[in-house]
Image (cartoon, rainbow, N blue to C red):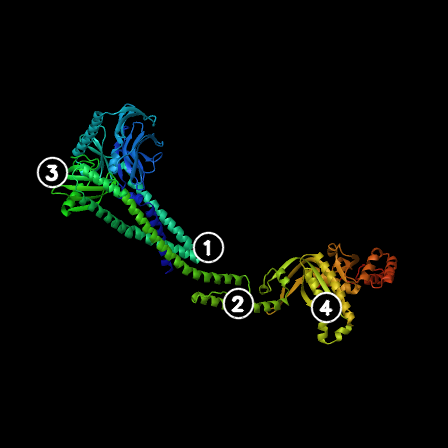
Amino acid sequence: MRNLRKFSIFLLFIAVFGVLLYSLFPAALGDMAENLRSGGGTRTFIQAVQGADGVAYALEAEPGGGYTLYGTSAEGRVSTQSLSAGLPQDFSVEQIYVAKNGCILLGLYERAGMELTRYALYAALPEQPFQLLLEAPLSGITGDQRRASAGLLYVTADGELVELAVLQEGEYAAYTFDPAQGQGLVAAGALGEEEVQAAQAAKEAALEQAGQAVALAGLPGASIAWLAPDGNGGALALLYESGQMLLSVSSQGGHTDLSAGLYRTPWQSGLVLALLVAGVLFLSYGFYYLVCEYQKLYFPLVVKNLLWLGLAGYVALSATLLFAIGPRYRAGAEENILAGLEAQAAQVTAEDSAGLTQAAQALAQADEAYGDCTFLRLGPGADGTYEVLASSGPEAAGTSLQAPGFLPGVAEQLALAQEKGLYAGHATSGGIGYYYAVGQNGENGVLYLRVQDRELTQEIQTGMLELALYAYGAVALVVVLSLLAIGEVALGARRVTRGVDLLAAGAPQVRVEHHTGDEMEALAAAFNDLSGALEEKKENAALAGNAYMRFVPRRLVALLGVSNIEQVDKDTSVSQEIAMMVVRFRFPEAAYQQDAQTLFDNINEVFAHIAGAVSGGGGTIYNFTHDGFDAVFESGPQAAVGAAVEVRQAFLELNAQREARGDAPVELRVALDHGVAMMGVVGDEDRVVPTVVSACLNTARKLVELAQVLDANILCTMVVADAAKDYNLRYIGKSRDGDSVIRVYEIFDGDPYGMRLAKESARASFSAGIYALYSGDYAQAKRLFMEIARQQGEDGVARHYLYLADRFEKQPPDWIGLNGTEPAGRREV
């Protein structure tokens, strides 16, 4: 089912781009398809002319307006030039002439809608824009009258120059033109009546000779849309209604097909069509991939449905307009036009050209769309075929309907009129579309009415455009109403999604309010139930987590490189440089004889006063015991020193409180070291605890024991002392730590105020005593330490050294240190 849906989407995109391509370029696609099928095409050629340069030219009227001139020969296309640069926006071509150097003379009638506004003569050198040579006003009511009021009488080569005559404002004026310059006319005076008649006779003779050549070639005159003499007694002929075939006919009747130069070769059309099909498939697959396969592409619900509904509506409506409604609308509009023409043909009874001209003027004045209309009175001629008896247009009386270039298909139209009495339809002559009506008038007379379809076709297209706009508007309204309904669903989904995002972000008490009385409201209610359940679970988890954190410090979890205590197991460990703090305290012996609750209350009271100083200084306590704790400082020894001083000050406040309520004071010692430590957890499958394995931890524990012996409050190693320059400290000697010897320092900023001042004042004497002792001058050391002890009886280190100096004076030791001559202790973890 999913594959069928994807395939349907792919077909939808093919239909969208296919319909879009066809709606944009229907004429070009039809021309290439016909060219691929038959080698010809569907282009409309309205004129052909033999250029003075020996090239045959055919003029194409493009479907969207404008003209293109093709130069062709028996070998194929010679040149292509678009007739646009320098020319009016809308015009119809009267006559075209190509000089030996390729310079083009173009006579045209400029248009404003259906009305012909002026006559103009332009010239252009190859690859150059057109330049205006001459312009003349037009007069008359109908299109035939206005065309007859101005135009070229003849154009002919005279050596390197071109001679031409132009009808303007009722007179024929002669000019010479230099094609090499491409601009400017030289007036040669007005033509007399005899000169005009001679020129017209020569023109008619050339056309008659061209017609004879066509007859010798066996080409039926009724199939020729345009006929032009080639200057050598032969002719150029455009065949069929739209001039799709160009023939060069010699004076002896031989003919050469020049049509190959008017169209692409079939393989070119096939290649272009194949590329267009490939492009449609490529675009279709690209959009299909973005929508169905590329999972990273996100479309909001409204946008996605707008896309689908819009595309489906566009394809369905466009196809309906192109292949169903459009043709029916056009057929209905044409029926109305033809019915009107039939009524006009039935009403006109005029027999001569003057009467027909009045009828044409009346029709043109009644409706501008019928401005280019022609009435003809037809009747049987001497040879039994129909000929023109009278006309409101340029057709001369006596012109046979079989004459080349004269209304192809009229014979068939007359036959239908004789059968039905009145007949109307649409035809093309010389690439120009006409609506016509044929009606019997008398026993043998026929009235023929034709109207150029330009303006009427535009009215039909305008009506179709309005119909399409209404149809697309209706589809758009349906799409909008559908999107409003979908938008309600999307709004509910968006609210639920926003709620999910808030839940994921940890927001408390998330609720979605959506009251539509449908499935989306049920979804919102289900979300609210889920949110409540998750909130309750979160609260329980928070309580459990807080309970866990009472046993495992949160900061220690972070130090172990995990984000959640649930991730901690026996494989969790880390190694880094840290500062170690070991704190030990001791109650008087009587406190340990009290009941258990009182003892634990005393222990927890100490922790409550001093633990905050450790965490506030950036430390993490990972191991509580009944007589102290161990802590680590990842930020270094300076932070550990500051925390140690804070611990001592908090401890002094605690002792003051205990003494105030009559409780015995507590002793508290602190030791510090810095080095590489390995942190992790140890235990069995059921229970694990955090621990630290490090030589610096062992050293700190040794120092805290030594502090108890020396009655010192804060002891540290030299590496810590180097970071404690801002604190009051003193070097107190050496101590053994296993096989190594460490230099021990005392930080006395955490001592009571009086003791701190005394140690500061005796700093020089104390240092001299240390130097004397370690130099072997035990008597001098004894005197110095005795003086310090006499003045400061509470200096435990001085008392300890006084004891050692007295002992060493009696029996010199092998090694001097704070722990005397005791052997090195076993390293502990």
The residue singled out by tag 1 in the image is 296
Q: Earlier in the sequence, mark 2 or mark 1?
A: 1
The residue singled out by tag 4 in the image is 606
- Pointers 2 and 1 in contact (C-beta within 8 Å): no
Q: 317 left or right of 565?
A: left
Which quadrant of the view contains residue 575?
Answer: bottom right
The residue singled out by tag 3 in the image is 384
- Pointers 4 and 3 in contact (C-beta within 8 Å): no
**Residues at marks 4 and 1, CA–CA distance in whole angstroms:** 59 Å
**Residues at marks 4 and 3, CA–CA distance in whole angstroms:** 138 Å
* Mark 3 element type: loop
The kind of residue on which mark 1 rests is: Lys
The residue singled out by tag 2 in the image is 534
Q: 311 left or right of 76?
A: right
Instruction: Depth check: give the residue in front, 428 or 744.
Output: 428
Mark 2 closeness class: few <14, some 14–19, many ≥20 residues within 10 Å: some
Q: 310 left or right of 804?
A: left
Mark 1 closeness class: few <14, some 14–19, many ≥20 residues within 10 Å: few
**Residues at marks 4 and 2, CA–CA distance in whole angstroms:** 40 Å
Mark 4 closeness class: few <14, some 14–19, many ≥20 residues within 10 Å: many
Q: Nearer the viewer, mark 4 or mark 3?
A: 3
Which quadrant of the view contains residue 238?
Answer: top left
Name the residue furthest bottom: 595
**Residues at marks 2 and 3, CA–CA distance in whole angstroms:** 103 Å
The kind of residue on which mark 3 rests is: Gly
* Mark 1 element type: loop
Q: Nearer the viewer, mark 2 or mark 3?
A: 3
Q: Nearer the viewer, mark 3 or mark 1?
A: 3
Vertical relation: 146 (above or below) 310? above
